[in-house]
Amino acid sequence: MKTLSVLKSLMLSGLILSTAVVKVKAQTPSYQSVIDAAYEKFKDLKEGKNADYIKELATVDPNIFGIVLVTADGKVYTKGDITSKVSIQSVSKVFTRAKVIEDQGAKAVQDKIGVDATGMRFNSVIAVEVQKGKEINPLVNPGAIASTSLIAGTDSATKWKNIVQIQSDFAGRQLSINQPVYVSEAGDNMHNQALAVLLLSYGRMYFDPREATDIYTKQCALNVDAKDLATMAATLANGGVNPVTKKTVVSPETVAHTLPVMCTAGLYDDSGIWLYNAGIPAKSGVGGGLLAVCPGKFGIAVVSPPLDAAGNSVKAQRVIEYVVEQLKVNPYLVVPKK
């Protein structure tokens, strides 16, 4: 009789525990339901406009809107237009820098480029002058061109091959260049060329400045879609292993030194605002792509060309902030222990 009573108690406890688990699961929305809701919530948002200082970007369809979330174990969730391609632009800076860290070490990047936010515009000459080429940050133009100059290779062709390969390994497929965008940018990149020469004068350019600028310009013209960007983000979320292809792209240590700079300089002049609202590393590009990383959980990307005044996709920011809030994955949101 006593044994029967104990069994009943155990069964009841198990039922209560099971019910509690079901309740917790019911309170956590699925990835698909959240991105579906985000798409519906923001699909009609008309704020922002395409970048036009690069002429080809002004002609991109402003109605492209796609969301992709890729988990650290390789599951893919999509909504909207995930096949239309845009140029990767400044998002590429993250992965070129990661390659330099992987090959030369985190200290080399800190010493040869710098990792502090400059506190000035992404293409500021003054930032270079004030710091004499130091602390220029690899996610703004001067630092990104310096990163390109540090990529392994004794000539432009080898450096370009290595850059395309690392970007492709992160994306999980072979990326190709958007030739019209490259031609448009290359014909009007005198400011970047000037930055590279200025860095050379301070001993902070590690390859021919004109050639390094050209490679950097081509890098920014690589074509990507929302799935490419989300897979790139998910590879960072998974410690450097592409969760779709299972290829080890970079080490966990490289990722650990890549994500913090995305936090401090990933969204141009609004990086602090982004971190304040979303709390996770992200990087935008003026082509309309924006990716974000929830370490250990997932990467998410949105493609929507209209940008705000700082150069960040309006819809992409709203979507990712919404997803972070709904999934409660802001790492600074801590539930107190009771």
Image (cartoon, grey):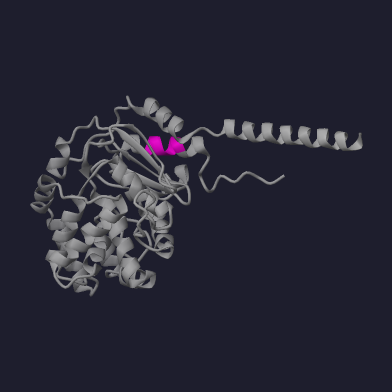
List x then y, in percent, for residue 145. 22, 62
Q: Is residue 321 magenta?
A: yes
- Which residue is at 47% across, 47% downward? 297
List x then y, in percent, for residue 333. 56, 44
What's the magenta region? 317-323
Quadrant hosting residue 75 = top left
Position of 296 with respect to 217 (left or right) is right
Note whether residue 250 is visible: yes
Image vertical order of residue 227 relative to residue 165, above or below: above
Q: Is residue 205 magenta?
A: no
List x then y, in percent, for residue 8. 82, 32
Position of 40 with respect to 165 (left or right) is right
Note whether residue 140 is visible: no
Residue extending farthest to the right is 1
- Which residue is at 63% across, 31% downward? 23
Image vertical order of residue 5 relative to residue 287, above or below: above
List x then y, in percent, for residue 217. 16, 55
- Specify the quadrant that holds the N terminus: top right
Quadrant hosting residue 190 = bottom left
Of 250 and 190, which appears nearest the observer? 250
Image vertical order of residue 144 relative to residue 17, above or below: below
> Chief secondary structure of the magenta span?
helix
Position of 283 with respect to 224 (left or right) is right
- Which residue is at 55% across, 34% downward? 28
